[in-house]
Image: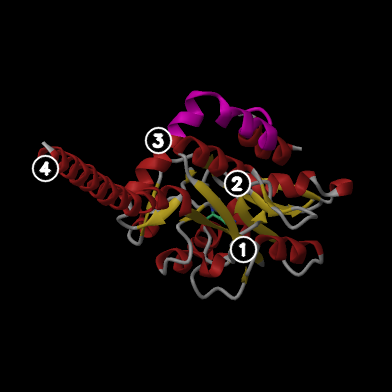
Amino acid sequence: MNTLAHSFVGRAALCVLLALALAACNKQDSGAAAPAASAPATAKVYVVGTDAAYAPFESQNEKGEIVGFDIDVVKAVAAKAGMEVKFVNTPWEGIFNALKQGDRDLLVSSITITDERKQSMDFTDPYFDAHQLIAVKADSKIARFEDLKSLKVGVQTGTTGDETITKLQGKNSPDIKRFESTPLALKELETGGIDAVVADNGVVVNYVKNNAGNKFKTVNDPAFLPEHYGVAVRKGNTELLARLNQGLAAIKADGSYDRIYASYLGAPDAAASAPAAAASK
Ligand code: ARG
């Protein structure tokens, strides 16, 4: 009886010990697995490159913060896609390389989707329609794009504005003045070093509007081709592309895209018709 009882207690104790040991083993397993599984969801911050000298799409405010239409669009898209984003001012000249090298995960910079660029990066669905527009002094006789054939024209290097004037004047034209940024080209127009600037309509309209004393005007031309802005990701980054496209569709569907548009560009037609209206003045 005594031995029986002993052995029963002994076995029971052994079982309890075994069970505890097993439980401890399980705990250790799941304990080790838990951080690994949850880490990627919290750690990844997507680095967004933007040349923040292109108001109202991307610029730096007095506090040095990067702001603008593009910025709010990507912030809203990221919120829908459950992504954390951080914007980093990136000079246009090296922006595509920064993406390629992995220094940036995506780019939003009023980037026109072109066949040439599509060879080396992937683009989201278009999020904005644009076209080139000419900025000239208010008293300028320039009335059409053709008038720029043998005049000094400022552009930002490597932009579609650059491509557009290069087609008209030829690659080696000494009259094409290429600048690191669009504001630098516009400064040169102000000081009289050049006769015109060719850049995206939204930026040109914004600049002319914000210049006191009606010193400048815009000139539109039907020859300017339709352009579409896209967010760029590394070629083959289909997962990120899909998330961005879903986010974009979501902000278009729920009205947040329209609200962002209105806050930076006014009524949807204003951006498109303002150039023509200003040009006919
Ligand atoms: N849309 C034009 C292009 O893709 C100009 C873009 C310039 N953007 C900028 N943030 N500076 O070539």
* Amino acid found under the numbered disc labelled 4: Thr
Closer-to-camera residue (136/238) = 238
Amino acid, disc 3: Gln
> In terms of sequence position, does the residue under pointer 2 or pointer 3 come before the other?
2
Task: Please name the residue that numbered disc 4 is placed on.
Answer: 3
Q: Amino acid at mark 1?
A: Val
Residue 252 magenta:
yes
Label whose residue precedes the other's in the sequence (4 or 2): 4
Which stretch appears magenta?
248-267
The three-letter amino acid code for the residue at tag 2 is Ile
Quadrant (top left/top right/bottom left/bottom right) for the N terminus: top left
What residue do we see at 15% from left, 37% from top? Answer: 5
Q: Quadrant of the C terminus?
A: top right
In x, y percent, where is residue 144?
62, 49
Which quadrant of the figure shows ligand 1?
Answer: bottom right
Mark 2–mark 1 distance (CA, rounded to whole Å): 23 Å
Q: Is residue 163 visible?
A: yes
Residue 200 is covered by the magenta coloring: no
Residue 89 location (% of width, % of height):
62, 61
Q: Is residue 92 above or below residue 140?
A: below
Q: Residues within 10 Å of mark 1 (few under 14, many from 20)?
A: many
> According to the image, label 2 marks what residue?
71
